[in-house]
Image (spheres, rainbow, N blue to C red):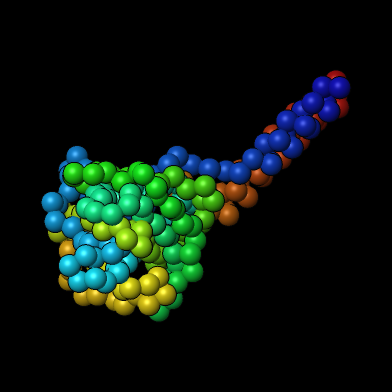
């Protein structure tokens, strides 16, 4: 009976995915998560009567992650309290292929910008060295501000009237503030090594019982 229980325990260990602690994949927030007062208009822009999506790129460095959350500073300026945020892949230096989307309703700060946290439910894998995008827009009649980062950080950014017609803007633009968090995915070699030692330990324990 004890042998059977031990085998069940080891089977359970093998069935558990190896995961590490949550980590910051990308952040251009200032000290104490400070922000610039200036921002980029997204959604319906009333003074030009145009609609605008905006987005910035990020790249996981050194390790792959599963997405845990996205945080961005938003503020409702006018219209319904609605916004949409998308995490996408990249093709040719532009957003392509939605990995996860978030619809905000009644969650936008009014009066001043504040970080809005969007918790992932599908936890897509973000591969090391790959480029990914976070793109946002207000509702069809909502004017929303996405504050820029205080560090004056620059890099790949896009804008456009629809999610499928985004164009690359100057990489010299000060980008919107963003914090992306995730859980590191162990390398396959690490999983094999841990599996080997578990099997070795199981063999030693079962061998002792056999010679009792």
- Determine whether 122 is above or below 93 in the image: above
- Residue situated in front as seen by the camera: 120 or 127: 120
Residue 49 versus residue 184 in the image, above or below: below
Residue 6: give x, y in percent of width and height: 77, 28
Q: Position of residue 1 (x, y in %)?
A: 86, 22
Q: What residue sits 44% from the left and 45% below the top?
A: 119
Q: Quadrant of the C terminus?
A: top right
Q: Identify the residue at image location x=39%, y=67%.
A: 131
Above or below, comparing residue 94 to residue 148 in the picture: below
Along the line of sight, the residue nearer the viewer: 204 or 100: 100
Can the viewer see residue 151 in this picture?
no
- Asked if residue 166 is positioned above or below residue 45 in the image, the reply reads below
Q: In percent of the image, x 52 and y 47: which residue is there?
A: 121
Res. 53 visible in picture? yes
Residue, x 25% and y 50% (percent of image)? 76
Please tell me in which quadrant of the rendered image residue 164 appears.
Answer: bottom left
Taking the image as shown, residue 204 lies to the left or right of residue 88, namely right
Q: Please provide percent x and percent y for residue 198.
A: 67, 38
């Amino acid at each position: 009976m004890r042998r059977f229980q031990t085998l069940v325990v080891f089977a359970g260990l093998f069935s558990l995915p190896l995961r590490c602690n949550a980590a910051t994949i990308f952040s251009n927030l200032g000290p104490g998560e400070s922000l610039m007062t200036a921002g980029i208009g997204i959604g319906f822009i009333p003074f030009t009567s145009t609609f605008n999506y905006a987005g910035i790129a990020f790249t996981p460095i050194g390790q792959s992650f599963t997405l845990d959350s996205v945080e961005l500073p938003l503020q409702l300026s006018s219209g319904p309290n609605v916004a949409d945020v998308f995490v996408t892949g990249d093709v040719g230096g532009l957003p392509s292929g939605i990995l996860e989307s978030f619809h905000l309703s009644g969650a936008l700060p009014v009066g001043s910008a504040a970080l809005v946290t969007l918790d992932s439910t599908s936890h897509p894998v973000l591969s090391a060295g790959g480029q990914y995008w976070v793109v946002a827009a207000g509702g069809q009649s909502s004017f929303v501000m996405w504050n820029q980062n205080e560090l004056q950080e620059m890099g790949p950014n896009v804008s456009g009237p629809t999610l499928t017609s985004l164009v690359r803007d100057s990489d010299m633009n000060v980008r919107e503030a963003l914090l992306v968090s995730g859980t590191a995915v162990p390398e396959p070699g690490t999983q094999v090594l841990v599996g080997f030692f578990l099997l070795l330990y199981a063999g030693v324990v079962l061998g002792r019982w056999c010679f009792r």
